[in-house]
Image: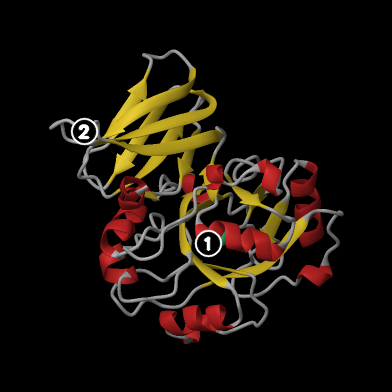
Amino acid sequence: MQTSLINPFGLHDADGYMWLKGNLHTHTTNSDGRVAPQARLDQYAAKGYDFLCLSDHDMITRVDTVCAPDNFVLVQGAELHPLNPFGGRQYHLLCLDIHEDMDSEAMAPQEVIDSVNDQGGAVWLAHPHFCAINILRDVMPLTGFAGIEVFNTSTRLAGRGEASVQWDDWSDLGGHLVPTIANDDAHATEAENRDTYAAWTVVRAKERSVAAIMQAIKSGASYATTGPDFHDISLSWIQDGTEAPGKFKATIRSSEALRVLAVTDYIGAEYTEQGKMFDRCELELRADNKWVRFELIGPNDTKAWSNPFDLALVQAT
Ligand SMILES: [Zn+2]
Ligand SMILES: [Zn+2]
């Protein structure tokens, strides 16, 4: 297995780390959004967000055309749409921290990904469930993605908001664990209350800067959520020295939860207290599991997704 992701809960306040909340996928009147760039930014800042990307379709909404409050981090990006030569639908690529516009529809998907990476940016596969992206057919022929958008508020309205199956397929097929983000993909006005303030990514970073936030999401030092919060995730390998086979133990601390799911490469586990809320739980995982990620189900159909953990590393420590 290639690079492992970082456990954000192993990064401590004492070392200067803080949690920052952001939405990295937003449209404005520069493309098909219904709110002007400055107003969109002001609204997210007023809601307590720490960072935002105004990711218009096929054009970069320049960060120097708006004015962000002190300490607010504006990531420059765009949603680019190369055609799909493999038989699937057109890609929606959320390209973050980019600086050069490109005519992505006239470019092959690999060319777009390479160009973004060459600029120092990162490409996230946006709402693959909504686009009917098949990981084996449409993603495995490509290299250079940063990760996947597991949840998208706007495409939830079409019944295809969550892409956890695509995410798991990618981790199984791609030879490495894939980090995730969740976003609103806001198009509507606040008053329409359709696709604003309902999904975000929480990152563990030392600085309020584009570089620190980009590094956190690419390395897995983050989680995605529509409401609940993870407070700690710890994993250990237990072998008591007898003939008994070893096992993995996971301890999760969180905001009030109704259910925690350990989703693994093969047969996961569930923790519940029969409808009672809890904020701490322990789960046991099979010794032959290769990776695990956690889903935290909170009240009112809310959910949080941890990034996946490489269990071979847990066993080795
Ligand atoms: Zn899109
Ligand atoms: Zn979009």
| For residue 82, above or below residue 128 | below
Looking at the image, residue 128 sits to the left or right of residue 27; the answer is left
Q: Nearer the viewer, residue 307 or 110?
A: 307
| Residue sitting farthest toward the front | 241
Quickly name the residue at label 1: 218
Q: Please tell me how crowded label 1 is: few (under 14), some (14-19), or many (20+) other residues with Cα within 10 Å.
A: many
Q: Which amino acid lies under the numbered mark 1 shown in the image of this protein?
A: Lys
Looking at the image, residue 70 sits to the left or right of residue 77; the answer is right
- Sequence-earlier tag: 2 or 1: 1
**How far apart are labels 2 and 1 at the CA level?**
38 Å
| Label 2: which secondary element | loop
* Image quadrant assignment for residue 25: bottom right
Rendered-image quadrant of the N terminus: bottom left
The image position of residue 93, as x and y in percent, is 50, 68
* Residue 52 appears in view: yes
The image position of residue 182, as x and y in percent, is 53, 49
Quickly name the residue at label 2: 241
* Image quadrant assignment for residue 175: bottom left
| Residue sitting farthest toward the left | 243
Q: Nearer the viewer, mark 2 or mark 1?
A: 2
